Amino acid sequence: MRKQIVAGNWKMNKDLKEGEQLTREILEMVKKEVNHNTGIVLAPPFIHLNSIAEIIKGNSLISLGAQNCHQQPSGAFTGEISASMLKSLDVQYVILGHSERREHFQESDELLAQKIDIVLENGMIPIFCCGESLETREANQQVSFVNSQLQKSLFHLSEQDFQKIVIAYEPIWAIGTGKTATSDQAQEMHANIREQISNKYGQRVADDTTILYGGSCKPSNAGELFAQPDVDGGLIGGASLKARDFVDIIKAF
Ligand code: PGA
């Protein structure tokens, strides 16, 4: 059975004290209120990872995630962070291909294929983001667009490696805009993604792949989104910055 996951992507928010405080609040609420084994991932900025690892240490409820990593193992790449550095801090998940990275840092499908490989080589789980712009959706090209992203960044993987991947469908027009995809729109794309996986790796692998929805997911809409048969949880931006909202989203399962 595939795993349900709710991951919080803090992006470039929270200083260290605020991040520690948020983590403690989430941990306390989760311990008291969450009685199912949904995977919970916190992805703070790189420089908070070590401190947050200390706070969540020894509990099996919350895992640590990073928001990116470099595609090379090490070397002269000033200002960059390698996969093995993340691994050494007990990071378990790495978000890759977020639309903000694609847009502001020119990350291509081909570059992301390299990042996927190095994260897997270091024993961590990539959360691979895909999703179309408003323009692409208005032209009704969203399915071929997302399929091409999957094809170029993921479908070089062996069946064994593919089974370690988590996918997040994040329509760009819904990210940070307050405009959520309807549960039908989310379900339709998630079913398409699962079908692509099935065509490439077979039905069993497709059935076991966790596919998250991201884009203005909040406590008021999480229940309906997560109730869709192919939606296995969420990648949460804005609402992951408030403990109450984030935990209420986890409880929406
Ligand atoms: P949002 O961001 O929840 O603020 O829309 C989602 C994301 O970018 O992962």
Image (tube, rainbow, N blue to C red):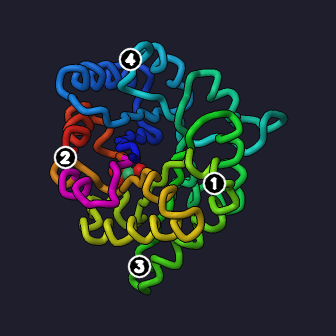
User: Of helix, strand and loop, which one carries label 3?
Assistant: helix
Q: Residue at x 59, y 42 (%)?
A: 68
Q: Residue at x 54, y 72 (%)?
A: 147
Q: Which mark is residue 159?
A: 1
Residue stretch rendered in magenta on the structure:
222-235
Q: Which mark is residue 219?
A: 2
Disc 4 marks a residue whose amino acid type is Asn
| Foreground disc of the pair 4, 2 | 4
Q: Is residue 223 magenta?
A: yes
- State how far apart marks 1 and 3 are (Cα): 30 Å
| Foreground disc of the pair 2, 1 | 1
Q: Residues within 10 Å of mark 2 (few under 14, many from 20)?
A: some
Q: Is residue 59 magenta?
A: no
Q: Residue at x 19, y 44 (%)?
A: 252
Q: Residue at x 29, y 60 (%)?
A: 229
> Quick one: label 4 or label 3, which is nearer the N terminus?
4
Q: Position of residue 28 (x, y in %)?
A: 25, 19
Q: Which mark is residue 137?
A: 3
Q: Position of residue 207 (x, y in %)?
A: 43, 57
- State how far apart marks 4 and 3 are (Cα): 41 Å
Image position of 139 (left or right of 6): right
